[in-house]
Image (spheres, rainbow, N blue to C red):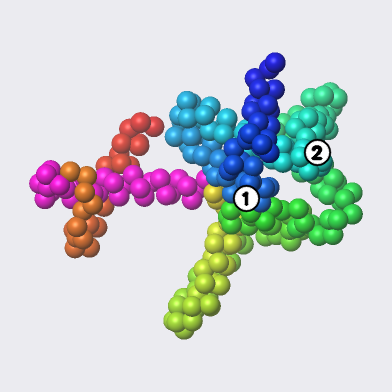
Amino acid sequence: MSRMDELLGIMMRLRDPKSGCPWDREQTFRTIAPYTIEEAYEVADAIERDCADDLADELGDLLFQVVFHAQLAREAGIFDFDDVVSAIIDKMVRRHPHVFRHERMPDAQQQIASWETMKAAERSADPSMRSHLDGIPVALPALSKATKLQSRAARCGFDWSDAQGVLDKLAEEKEELAEAVASGEKASIEEEIGDMFFTLVNLARHLGVDPEVAARSANRKFERRFRALEEEVRREERAAAAGDAPIPKQPIESLERLWSSIKDRQRESSSSKG
């Protein structure tokens, strides 16, 4: 028996109505979905931390989610794990004619365009797809969904011709946000901030930047610098006895001075490594 068969057997055992795990038996597609999303994020986190051991572990957790959903479907008589595997095999072969049918594909950019064309043709052949925006997952993170919406609209020609047009739009949205802030109306402020995010995603798309990756990078940079800031405050106050306790509130002028110093040091360190 292969290890994959062993994993499928474990899943069946966990769902056994008599001897299985009470928690696993209670789960449905809907209740398991949040865990599936969480495991995908943990895979991405392991990759960003460049931790191979954690990546292997997290990929296993994600695989288990696939097996769990397949078992639920098997019990409902919808499909089983073999159907899942067959579907992805068929799709990969169909969408890679340059590999499996020896069609010429000179570069990666043409392959990406070919892939998107095939996906669009598949959607057009589906009678349930009445809009170019149909089929975009509801649960996608907001920035990723904005990118998908904009890319689909762009295929119909609804797009700026270059990044400068998006920059002009961003300036317009900034003015509208300032007006909303001046009005003090929370609903208007929320709407305009949303428009700013959406336009920034459009700018990232035109510049070939993944907005989710950029946002996560900014989060990591802030966390790295703020932790260094805390250490600087502790050092200046000679509060070694306080250990890792959170620092007390500091004057903003002092924090800004330390923040600027930390930014300069980390930039210099990054430059020297490059």
Q: Which residue is mark 2?
A: 79
Residue lying at 78% horizontally and 43% vertically, measured from the top left: 76
| Vertical order, 173 against 13 (above or below) | below
Viewed as shown, does residue 231 lie left or right of 218? left
Which part of the image, by quadrant, shows the C terminus?
top left
Q: Of marks 2 and 1, which one's residue comes earlier in the chain?
A: 1
- The kind of residue tagged 1 is Thr
The residues colored magenta run 213-242
| Dot 1 crowding, Cα within 10 Å, few <14, some 14–19, many 20+ | few
Q: Quadrant of residue 92?
A: top right
Q: Looking at the magenta stretch, what is its main secondary structure?
A: helix
Q: What distance separates the C-alpha of mark 2 from that of mark 1?
A: 19 Å
Q: Is residue 222 covered in magenta?
A: yes
Residue lying at 36% horizontally and 50% vertically, measured from the top left: 222
| Vertical order, 79 against 154 (above or below) | above
Q: Nearer the viewer, residue 88 or 117?
A: 88
Q: How many marks?
A: 2
> Is any atom of residue 244 visible in this view?
yes
Q: Nearer the viewer, residue 42 or 13?
A: 13
Q: Position of residue 130 (x, y in %)?
A: 84, 59
Q: Position of residue 189 (x, y in %)?
A: 50, 75
Viewed as shown, does residue 220 lie left or right of 157? left
Q: Position of residue 96 (x, y in %)?
A: 79, 30
| Dot 2 crowding, Cα within 10 Å, few <14, some 14–19, many 20+ | some
Q: Which residue is mark 1?
A: 31
